[in-house]
Image (cartoon, rainbow, N blue to C red):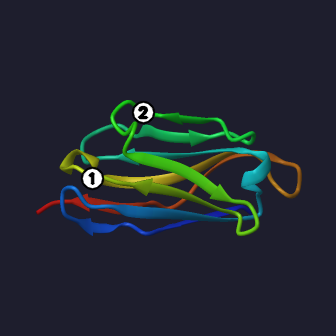
Amino acid sequence: QVQLVESGGGLVQPGGSLRLSCAASGIAFSINDMSWHRQAPGKERELVARLTANLNTYYADSVKGRFTISRDNPKNTAYLQMNILVPEDTAVYYCNVKGVDYSTRWGDYWGQGTQVTVSS
């Protein structure tokens, strides 16, 4: 069974930083594409950053230069380092992986989300 567990959210002042983590079980980040998404109140969920299996990255224009996506293969954990946070970054952040799990089944998996609030 695949599980993605996010952590690291919280309340931060504008200009501050947070690092989100996504710990995976049942599926390996090293051979699949993973991404971070966010959903602000009243808005649709949007893609923030993507990291492919071969380490190509994509960032939404709104976070380019401020956020960095990465992973630690031995820990099977992905990260989203968020710097120079602004109130518009306030949202629930979700980890997502699309790919093949340890039972060789393809799936589209989501974590439960972690709240990030940027406010003074």
Q: Position of residue 23 (x, y in %)?
A: 62, 66
Q: Residue furthest left?
A: 120
Observer-nearest residue: 71 or 113?
A: 71
State the image coordinates of residue 96 (x, y, percent, origin top left): 58, 49
Left or right, 11 with respect to 92, comes to: left
The N terminus, quarter of image: bottom right
Pointer 1: what residue? 85
Mark 2 and mark 1: Cα distance apart in space? 14 Å
Q: Residue at x 25, y 48 (%)?
A: 41
Q: Is residue 44 above or below residue 110?
A: above
Residue at image point 88% right, 50% down:
104
Which one is nearer the viewer's eye here, 45 or 83?
A: 83
**SS at circle 2:** loop
Residue type at mark 1 is: Leu
Q: Amino acid at mark 2?
A: Ala
Side of 120 relative to 18 (left or right):
left
Residue drawn at x 84%, y 48% is 105
| On screen, residue 82 above or below 63 | below
Which mark is first along the chain, 1 or 2? 2
Q: Residues within 10 Å of mark 1 (few under 14, many from 20)?
A: many
Q: To which residue does mark 2 refer? A: 60
User: Where the C terminus falls, by quadrant?
Assistant: bottom left
